[in-house]
Amino acid sequence: MTTAIAPSMKSISFFREKVKDGIIEITGTYSPVCPICGKPMKSHGRCRRYLRISGEKRITLSVRVFYCPECGRYHRELPDYITPYKHLSTDMIAEIYDGTDNYDVDDSTIIRVRNWVRKFLSFGAATVRRLKLEHPALEIRNSFESTSDTLTYFVRMVVNSNEWKFISSPVISV
Ligand SMILES: [Zn+2]
């Protein structure tokens, strides 16, 4: 018996979606490399992920799981509209933060979401600045169209640089 370690993740922008038996299958367009060591990974089946996209509407996704033979870790491949460990879609989180949300969420959820977004936006900006210093050739974005756009970008940068562990504990979910 081993202690459960939350699998780490890979956040992707390019993927196909196929609905099968009411479940949305996400398949990345590119062969994934390990977010920790950069080596090619091996396929390790799929797992389910639930996501609340508006009001009480939930969807079920099937995402690919990969194993990295180099560092021995498992990674889930998440489409970039998912914020790790959050049950609300990134769009919904952004709308709650912006106050444009009409969804049926309680006040304590609103407070938690807003606090988390505030913390994450500064963490994401700091992470991107640091990545740029470490990898001067890295192209980074400086302008964004909306909160959702900013969050999506920062989620991908933070997840794929394996920095997520510093922002959020898996036991705290929104
Ligand atoms: Zn690896």
Image (tube, grey):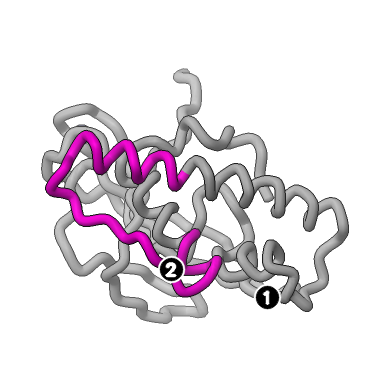
Q: Is mark 1 on a helix, strand or loop?
A: strand
Specify start and end residues of the magenta stretch as a single range.
Answer: 124-151
Instruction: Identify the residue at image location x=49%, y=20%.
Output: 3
Q: In this view, does 90 lie above or below 118?
A: below
Q: Position of residue 56 (x, y in %)?
A: 74, 73
Q: Which of marks 2 and 1 is in front?
A: 2
Residue 150 painted magenta: yes
Mark 2 and mark 1: Cα distance apart in space: 23 Å
State the residue lying farthest toward the right: 107
Q: Which amino acid does label 1 sit on?
A: Ser
Q: Which amino acid does label 2 sit on?
A: Phe
Judged left or right of residue 94, residue 109 is right
Left or right: residue 80 compared with residue 121: left
The image position of residue 60, as x and y in percent, is 54, 68
**Residue at figure coordinates x 55%, y 66% from the top left:** 147
Where residue 144 is drawn, which disc sits there? Answer: 2
Label 2 beta carbon within 8 A of ligand 1: no
Q: Sort mark 1 into few (<14), some (14-19) or many (20+) by Cα contacts within 10 Å.
A: some
Vertical relation: 10 (above or below) 4 = below
Q: In the rendering, which numbered label is found on residue 54?
A: 1
Q: In the figure, is residue 76 to the left or right of 149?
A: left
Image quarter of residue 28:
bottom left
Observer-nearest of 120 and 24: 120
Circle 2 Cα neighbour tier, 10 Å, few/some/many (<14 / 14–19 / ≥20):
few
Q: Residue 93: x and y, percent?
A: 63, 62
State whether residue 68 is above or below residue 87.
Answer: above
Residue 145 percent coordinates (x, y): 46, 74
The residue under the point 49% across, 41% down is 123
Question: From the viewer's perspective, is residue 12 above or below residue 65?
Answer: below
Q: Are the residues tagged 2 and 1 within 8 Å (C-beta)?
A: no
- Which structural element holds mark 2? loop
Q: In this view, does 32 lie to the left or right of 45?
A: left
